[in-house]
Amino acid sequence: MSRLQIVIPLYPAVTHLDFTGPHQVLSRLPDTDVLVASMGGADVEAEGLTFTGLADLAKVERCDLLCVPGGFGATDAMLDEAFMDEIRRLGGGARYLTSVCTGSLILAAAGFLTGKRAACHWAWRDLLRPFGAIVDEGRVVRDGDVITGGGVTAGLDFAFVVAAELAGESFAQAIQLGLEYAPSPPFQSGRPELASPEVLAVVKARLSPAVETRVAAAQAAADRLNAVS
Amino acid sequence: MSRLQIVIPLYPAVTHLDFTGPHQVLSRLPDTDVLVASMGGADVEAEGLTFTGLADLAKVERCDLLCVPGGFGATDAMLDEAFMDEIRRLGGGARYLTSVCTGSLILAAAGFLTGKRAACHWAWRDLLRPFGAIVDEGRVVRDGDVITGGGVTAGLDFAFVVAAELAGESFAQAIQLGLEYAPSPPFQSGRPELASPEVLAVVKARLSPAVETRVAAAQAAADRLNAVS
């Protein structure tokens, strides 16, 4: 039997936990290879950590599951035509299209989420709309073979959903036990509706300088998508 | 005011999520540098991901908080005298001594946990005993300025406890919201007492080939520690 191939495409200024969490889970699946790739196989700097030894995305022949992480660089990435060509090529042949955080914007810009329900980081999920995706506030959202996770740490819950789909729930539970995934946050402020108004205001203020640029980038990417379709 | 310095020492076959989770949280603290280092600044391979651009551990002058990740390589690391010299040197000058997963074995081998309560990955926590540490089954355990987390994903809960200690709970909550840390595992098998007997048996069987070697390594490291003290 051939091995299952999972491909994680990286780009500059990706958020590292968006993919290190899923990688730690999915790389423990049986008969599965998890390939982490970038344009030209170049090293990728991701919020203070640098990843090397990456595969060249253009030389990856195919994959069964494409898992696109998010990050501050996601909006630049979705306007990078060479990168998006590879996303469209690999995604077009994949059984499963998946993402974590703002990685769903990249899937959307590739045309894979039109008419599909999808998750995204809470602060950026409205950017899915110009692409015709249906915004879903769920932490892990499944629409057929499209499985998307919410912001950053949702990648862990996402990864266990994917692991159960690929290898069965019992196998996924064994990985969960091995990684001791019984989360217990010391406080509860991980969603806008849980956070205090003060904390929400601080985070929104911190993100606000990026809003205009990202809205414009999403619109530009949506215009390109709609021009070809 | 001088900036707070957090140092994360890596070694071969570290478990990447043990430190990428904490790094993603702690690198968002104000006036804080998170330095990821290895012996000679060499690239480190960690369960399928390779990290580059690391600081040379021997050239790191000091730190305020030492955060030691765990992994399959932890038992080799605690018998590597050159590595342990740096752990003892940096830890000796640190305000906070911290670890995730089997990283506490390295702190213990350095003599930092004698008489202290500490967490560890559930499968390996008994290895703390020869060092005179007091095994604690908590997910995040604090004993004075020693803060230790349980297995792998406990590193996230650990990191938010540390973030609140260093920057206040409100700031830590803002980071939690930014990283959307409102975990929701699709099934509950993340601790031995939660897992089914079948899943527990599978994981124990998978770990069993390593038990004899790790018990011997911990005993050898404890003998060295007891010989000097």
Image (cartoon, coloured by chain):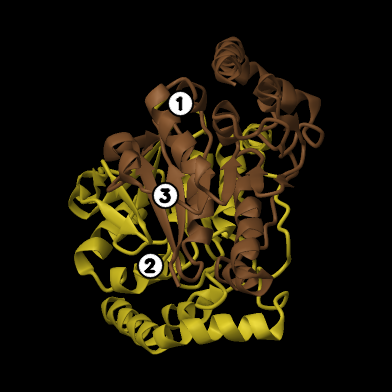
Chain colours: A yellow, B brown
Q: Which residue is mark 3?
A: B62
Question: Where B52 falls versus A46 (above or below)?
Answer: above
State which quadrant residue B207 falls in. Answer: top right
Question: How many numbered markers are drawn?
Answer: 3
Q: Earlier in the sequence, mark 1 or mark 3?
A: 3
How many other residues sit within 10 Å of disc 3, few (<14), some (14-19) or many (≥20)? some
Q: Which mark is residue B77?
A: 1
Query: Residue at point 24% right, 62% down?
Result: A83
Q: Quadrant of the C terminus of chain B?
A: top right
Query: Residue at point 57% right, 52% down?
Result: B95
Q: Position of residue B161 (x, y in %)?
A: 66, 57
Residues at marks 2 and 1 on the same chain:
no
Q: Position of residue B58 (x, y in %)?
A: 33, 39
Q: Distance between the Cα atoms at labels 1 and 3?
A: 20 Å
Subunit that carries the residue with mark 1 = B
Question: Where B199 falls versus A65 (above or below)?
Answer: above
- Is B172 positioned to the left or the right of B77 in the image? right
Type of residue at label 3?
A: Arg
Q: Which mark is residue A106?
A: 2
Type of residue at label 2?
A: Ile
A201 or A116: nearer the viewer: A201
Query: Residue at point 51% right, 41% down?
Result: B91
Query: Residue at point 50% right, 46% down?
Result: B93
Q: Distance between the Cα atoms at labels 3 and 2?
A: 41 Å
- Is A7 positioned to the left or the right of A89 in the image? right
B85 or A86: nearer the viewer: B85
Q: State which mark lies toward you, 1 or 3.
A: 3
Q: Distance between the Cα atoms at labels 2 and 1?
A: 40 Å
Callout 1 secondary element: helix
State which quadrant residue B181 falls in. Answer: bottom right
Subunit that carries the residue with mark 3 = B
